[in-house]
Amino acid sequence: MGLKTLVCRLRFPSGLRVGGLSGDPDRVESVVTASTLWGGVGCCAAHLAPKEEVSALIRGGRLSSLLWVREDRWFVPCPRIPWKGIHPEARKSLKKWAWVPLEDLSGVLAGEVPPGEPPRLFREDRQMAVTLDRKTCASLPYARRRLLPEPGVEGVLVAQVPREGEAL
């Protein structure tokens, strides 16, 4: 079975949910989970394609991590590696970078701090919600977190999907 590659640039006008729905009672995970991405891809595809194609995408497709782009400048997650042989201040400065421009990635891997300040690609929104404890029936407040991309920032997914007419 052959796969074709799609690059999807995504806008998130209402933001993205942060953290999972289970296993994270304090909602402190600072990741966008695969279930959130697949749910969004599936919902969008359902509005654009026939049911059979959506089913093939969900069952046989593959997605990359969520990357970010602003004004045709691509950002990738800053690698968390043990940089050896670099000044402690540089190591401390690198920890401030969550996302690095793609063109600076090789320098970061070598322990070099990218020029300028870390980019602000999105802001976080928190709304308080309440859930019930199943044992005590007590109400438990928790923060629902959403990432709100800054103006001009889009998410990027690279997807591999089955070619048309091919069985899974």
Image: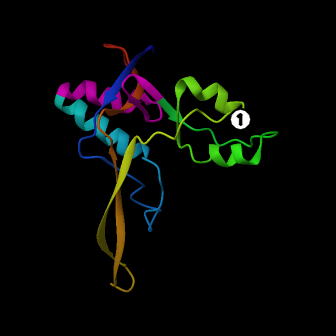
Does the magenta run of residues contain 68? yes
Left or right: residue 47 versus residue 138 is: left
Visual colour scheme? rainbow
State the residue at coordinates (43%, 25%): 73
Q: Is residue 155 above or below residue 148?
A: above
The quarter of the displayed image where residue 6 is located? top left
Residue 164 coordinates in the image, percent (x, y) = 31, 13
State the residue at coordinates (39%, 83%): 135
Is the C terminus in the top left, top right, bottom left or bottom right quadrant? top left
What number of labels is visible?
A: 1
Magenta stretch, residue numbers: 48-74
Left or right: residue 106 versus residue 72 is: right
Observer-nearest residue: 138 or 74?
74
Observer-nearest residue: 77 or 46?
77
Question: Alpha-carbon neighbours of circle 1 within 10 Å: few (<14), some, or many (≥20)?
Answer: some
Residue 36 coordinates in the image, percent (x, y) = 36, 45
Does the magenta run of residues contain 124? no
Observer-nearest residue: 51 or 38?
38
Residue 122 coordinates in the image, percent (x, y) = 37, 44
State the residue at coordinates (21%, 32%): 46
The quarter of the displayed image where residue 153 is located? top left
Residue 20 coordinates in the image, percent (x, y) = 42, 55
Question: Given the current orientation, which residue lies at the most extreme right position?
Answer: 85
Left or right: residue 6 versus residue 79 is: left
The residue indicated by pointer 1 is 111
Q: In terms of secondary structure, where does tag 1 sit?
A: loop
Q: Amino acid at mark 1?
A: Gly
Is the N terminus in the top left, top right, bottom left or bottom right quadrant? top left
State the residue at coordinates (31%, 73%): 131
Observer-nearest residue: 135 or 77?
77
